[in-house]
Amino acid sequence: MSPFEYISLLTSIVLAIGITRILTGVGKVVQLHSNLRIYWVHLMWTANVFLWLLLNWWILFRWHTYEGWTFFLFLFVLVSPIVAFLLSVVLLPEPLDGGTDLKQLFFENRRWFFSLAALLPPIDAIDTLLKGWDHFLAQGIQYPIVLIVVFSLCILGIFSKDEKFHAGFAVFFLLFILAFISLNLRILT
């Protein structure tokens, strides 16, 4: 087993637990749909976190040629999957019971959710820089701009109770993540 395979094993497990949490939560929402008050923004963020977890797993492969693994680098690579897992827990807490109002749940947990989400852009920037300055520059000027925008929107999300803001941010993030995925389809080839 190569160092990358060894390191990626635990990282993959954390990502898989987050994915499982999302899928189990969505299954529970489907199962209880007639007894829940559904909120599309909550479901949109659930889809966004699911896609972020998948993208994290996919992009983890960029580390496969790295040879200088240390315990601290391993911990750093593990941080983003842990944060994404915690986002899935905040979105879909256990137990999710009939009678739950997903809108109320979303707004009650928005401070935790967006505080955690605000960690992801700086973590991503550091991760990209750790792969080398040339790799960071190869992302283009839009990369730091989008990270700053997403970080700023997360900070606003902590404090905002405006439904239109949260709806717009959820849609923006979905478009951002889909664009990012489309730009990174060929990573493993």
Image (cartoon, grey):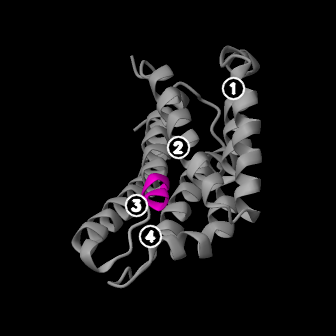
Sequence-wise first label, 1 or 4: 4
Sequence-wise first label, 1 or 3: 3
Residue type marked 2: Val
Q: Quadrant of the C terminus?
A: top left
Comparing labels 2 and 3, the label whose residue is closer to the camera: 2
Read off the magenta span: 40-45
- Measured as percent of width and height from the top left, residue 102 is found at 45, 72
Residue 133: in magenta span? no
- Measured as percent of width and height from the top left, residue 35 is found at 29, 80
Q: Determine the residue positioned at 61% across, 47% down.
A: 169
Q: Secondary structure at mark 2?
A: helix
Residue at the disc numbered 3: 17
Q: Determine the residue positioned at 65% across, 33% down.
A: 68
Residue type marked 1: Tyr
Comparing labels 1 and 3, the label whose residue is closer to the camera: 1
Q: Quadrant of the N terminus?
A: top left
Q: Distance between the Cα atoms at labels 3 and 4?
A: 13 Å
Sequence-wise first label, 3 or 4: 3
Residue type marked 4: Leu
| Residues at circles 2 and 1 in contact by the CB criterion of under 8 Å | no
Residue at the disc numbered 2: 171
Q: Distance between the Cα atoms at labels 1 and 3?
A: 28 Å
